[in-house]
Amino acid sequence: MTVLQTIIMSIVQGITELLPISSSGHLVLFSKILDIQEVSNFTLTSLHLGTTLAIVLFNWKFLFTDIQSKIKLYTYIVVATVPAALIGALFSDAIESYLRSTMVVAVSLIVVGIIMIVVDRKALQNKEGGVMELENVTFKQTLSAGFAQTLALIPGISRSGITTIAGVFSGLNQYVAIRLSFILGIPILLGSFLYEMIKTENSLTMITQPNSILAIVITFIAGYASLWLLDRMSKTRFLMYFGVYRILLGVIILLSI
């Protein structure tokens, strides 16, 4: 990719990886717009490093203060990461071969968008009840989000989107559910980056190239900005907003095929 393409794709990845709107759907669309033939797995997972750093920095106070009181939650998160890690390691090649198509991405965007709107309306009818503090999330609720995370291996699903939906269904407040999704994403995003580094020949040389460093830095900045934006949005209706957006994007992609 050219420098300009790298900058644009990094901004897109940084924003859409963390918001529940599917980074793969946006990358498909912007690849067509920018006439990029293919974005390699190594490039995508390198960008995960930027978004992981954004999550860690944005949640620094929560993650690294009063750690002892959060040991139970961190244990839950480690265990809940195992299903997606195993499925990803065993079936990533098959998913890459059979499911990474524009049609799958578009349909996934629309279906999950509809589910988001339904979940949002259900939460509104319940007067946005549920667990209101991240520290009070149970093992069952964390594991539910962890299993949902395996579905995010399907392009267009959105990891943060599907885990937030699972969190709300398991009894979490919408905002707590997406915060759990971010924390749950740290080990899986960092793990996917390290896995790709290990299996890719000359990965250390590739990751230290100016384009790669630029991509990671921009993805970090865009990811942090998206977290800041979400933190200032309505804490109760964002699933509806993003659900409508996903449906519109899915329709646009279908029309562009």
Image (spheres, rainbow, N blue to C red):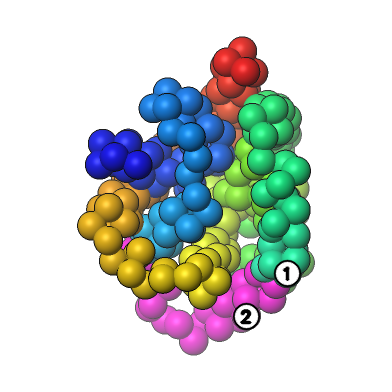
Q: Is residue 1 magenta?
A: no
User: In this image, 12 relative to 40: left or right?
Assistant: left
Tell me if residue 78 comes above or below residue 32 in the rendering: below
Residues at marks 2 and 1 touching, judged by CB atoms closer than 8 Å? no
What secondary structure is found at the residue carrying circle 1?
A: helix
Residue identified by numbered label 2: 75
Residue identified by numbered label 1: 86
CA separation in Å, label 2 and label 1? 17 Å
Sequence-first disc among 2 and 1? 2
Image position, residue 50 (x, y; %): 37, 58
Determine the residue positioned at 55% across, 71% down. Answer: 199
User: In this image, 51 relative to 107: left or right?
Assistant: left
51 vs 235, nearest the viewer: 51
Tell me if residue 200 comes above or below residue 41 in the rendering: below
Determine the residue positioned at 27% across, 61% down. Answer: 209
- The circle on residue 169 is none
User: In this image, 48 relative to 152: left or right?
Assistant: left
8 vs 41, nearest the viewer: 41
What secondary structure is found at the residue carrying circle 2?
A: helix
Q: Quadrant of residue 65?
A: bottom left
Quarter of the picture containing the N terminus is: top left
Q: Is residue 81 magenta?
A: yes
As drawn, which residue projects farthest toward the bottom? 68
Which span is picked out in magenta? 56-82
